[in-house]
């Protein structure tokens, strides 16, 4: 597929290409141009040319275009989900959820388009003020490979509704569904140049977005280390910036919890998307009174998970997205074994055999008796490996939960209101779930504390973050 700049498919100026392959089979799917700094400049020019007309449209009209796009995405969700599974690896059921989640986001923003924020201030003898919100201008978006469709929605929904135009760069391994969605948005009425998609590597196309002076706001989702680098690069320019970075979410299970429900929560929370989710359950703290029973039940469920090509039916877990990601996971588990910093209860190996040979499959893994300073606990583990720790009481659980540089999400599994309040008050995370984990509907503000990031996506908060106030001061 080609890049989408100013409403046209284009190879850009580059002569280099990036192959997109199916992580389950190694099969070549398509190729995209490796966009360059010049391609980003063209995209910024197209976004600049489209800006005035788009910003001056009534917000309601912009919302209607998002609404029509959502309808078309729903109409084509099977094809889109199929494409997403082929490039990303996740089971088709999860891809379908993600595509429908994208439509939900557009519908949410279309739905609030009638509610334009502003205020009137009466200042007595000084006069009166009318405060309105205006778009920021051209925005940049950089997307990761783990949830490429949902995260595209989180960025374009509020940015476009607020009246901005955008240059978006997908991850190198998952550009195809993002490109397809940009075409659908244009077919639904988005004017050429409002949304431009430039494919390419982070080092080339990505850093050109970060450093383009005409881009007023940058929204990045990805790894912490990249986030730090981007913040430094962007620091030379006066840009608004949202960073959605890594997570190491704790899940705490107390003795009064519904154990079966909590087991299912841990299973989905950790192994959804082969564990490659920012708010996955990455550390599980179980109260010692129930830990034996809980672990037995969880192990049974983990052992029953079907791993395979996401396009096949009855598959629970697909491959990891790349050989590199799988290698990282494999190494950290091996180091844990070697250093005796934890015991591998089940899994802990790359899958072999004809069905798995060409793909990046890793058997879902539970590790118990994990030391608090093990990399399994201190680092973000972006794959299907769950460290389980037994805790004697809530205080210890909260202390351990906060013993991290991250702060994206956390969950508490209990029926006790006092316990819920304690965790909500004392655990440092952008979202605290009670008796669930992972769910983030479009209404809910989402983002991390500490190294989890800067700013919030989703909901009304994101819409505000893509606009600025402008005041009319009437000095009668
Ligand atoms: P990554 O940082 O490697 O890449 C993310 C994007 O940044 C890609 O498009 C990449 O090409 C681009 N990029 C890389 N280097 C760049 C540079 N120097 N300049 C500009 N762009 C650059 O991350 P990833 O491996 O794709 O994604 C996984 C990470 O994303 C995990 O840490 C995960 O927790 C995090 N994540 C966070 C959220 C959230 O909302 N907080 C959501 C999903 C994923």
Image (cartoon, rainbow, N blue to C red):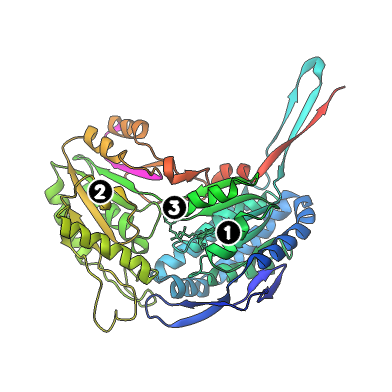
Mark 2 and 3 residues: CB-CB less than 8 Å, in contact? no
148 inside magenta stretch: no
Q: Nearer the viewer, mark 1 or mark 2?
A: 1
**Residue of label 1:** 207
Q: Position of residue 101 (x, y in %)?
A: 50, 59
x 66%, y 64%: residue: 40
Horizontal side of residue 263 vs 444, given as left or right: left
Say which of 279 and 234 sits in front.
234
Q: Position of residue 217 (x, y in %)?
A: 63, 49
- For disc 2, the neighbor class at 10 Å (few under 14, some 14 to 19, many from 20) is many
Horizontal side of residue 315 vs 8, given as left or right: left
Residue 298 visible at all: no
Horizontal side of residue 117 vs 287, given as left or right: right
Vertical comparison of 197 with 243: above or below = below
* Mark 1 CB near ligand 1 (8 Å cut): yes
**Residue of label 3:** 225
Quadrant including the C terminus = top right
Tell me where the magenta segment starts and ends, as one range. Answer: 408-417
Separation (CA) of disc 1 from disc 2: 36 Å
x 78%, y 59%: residue: 49
413 inside magenta stretch: yes
Horizontal side of residue 288 vs 241, given as left or right: left
Which numbered marker is on residue 11? none
Q: Nearer the viewer, mark 2 or mark 3?
A: 3
* Mark 3 CB near ligand 1 (8 Å cut): yes
**Residue of label 2:** 284
Outermost residue toward the top? 125
Secondary structure state at the residue bearing disc 2: strand
Residue 291 visible at all: yes
x 26%, y 43%: residue: 252
């Amino acid at each position: 597929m080609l890049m989408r700049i100013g409403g046209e498919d284009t190879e850009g100026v580059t002569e280099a290409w990036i192959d997109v392959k199916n992580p389950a089979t190694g099969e070549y799917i398509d190729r995209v141009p490796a966009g360059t700094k010049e391609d980003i400049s063209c995209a910024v020019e197209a976004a600049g040319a489209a800006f005035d007309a788009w910003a001056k449209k009534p917000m309601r009209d912009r919302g209607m275009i998002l609404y029509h796009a959502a309808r078309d995405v729903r109409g084509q969700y099977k094809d889109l989900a199929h494409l997403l599974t082929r490039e990303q690896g996740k089971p088709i059921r999860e891809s379908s959820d993600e595509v429908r989640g994208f439509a939900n986001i557009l519908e949410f923003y279309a739905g609030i388009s009638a509610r334009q924020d502003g205020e009137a201030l009466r200042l007595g003898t000084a006069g009166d003020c009318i405060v309105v919100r205006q778009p920021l201008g051209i925005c940049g978006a950089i997307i990761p490979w783990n949830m490429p469709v949902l995260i595209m929605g989180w960025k374009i929904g509020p940015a476009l509704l607020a009246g901005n135009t955008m240059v978006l760069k997908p991850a190198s391994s998952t550009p195809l569904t993002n490109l397809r969605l940009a075409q659908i948005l244009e077919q639904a009425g988005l004017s050429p140049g409002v949304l431009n998609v430039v494919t390419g590597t982070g080092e080339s196309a990505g850093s050109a977005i970060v450093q383009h002076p005409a881009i007023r706001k940058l929204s990045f989702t990805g790894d912490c280390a990249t986030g730090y680098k981007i913040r430094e690069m962007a620091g030379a320019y006066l840009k608004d910036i949202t960073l959605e970075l890594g997570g190491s979410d704790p899940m705490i299970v107390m003795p009064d919890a519904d154990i079966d429900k909590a087991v299912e929560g841990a299973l989905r929370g950790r192994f959804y998307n082969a564990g490659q989710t920012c708010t996955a359950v990455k550390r599980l703290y179980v109260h010692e009174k129930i830990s034996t029973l809980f672990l037995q039940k969880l192990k049974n469920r983990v052992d029953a998970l079907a791993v395979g090509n996401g396009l096949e039916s009855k598959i629970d877990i697909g491959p990891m997205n790349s050989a590199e990601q799988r290698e990282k996971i494999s190494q950290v588990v091996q180091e844990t074994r070697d250093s005796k910093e934890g015991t591998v209860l089940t899994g802990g190996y790359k899958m072999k055999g004809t069905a798995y040979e060409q793909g990046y499959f890793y058997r879902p893994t539970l590790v118990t008796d994990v030391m608090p300073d093990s990399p399994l606990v201190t680092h973000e583990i972006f794959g299907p490996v769950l460290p389980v720790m037994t805790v004697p009481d809530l205080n210890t659980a909260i202390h351990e939960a906060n013993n991290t540089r991250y702060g994206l999400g956390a969950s508490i599994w209990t029926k006790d209101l006092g316990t819920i309040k304690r965790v909500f008050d004392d655990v440092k995370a952008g979202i605290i779930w009670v008796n669930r984990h992972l769910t983030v509907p479009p209404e809910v503000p989402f983002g991390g504390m500490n190294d989890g990031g800067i700013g919030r996506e989703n909901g009304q908060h994101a819409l505000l973050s893509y606009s600025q106030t402008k005041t009319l001061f009437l000095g009668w």
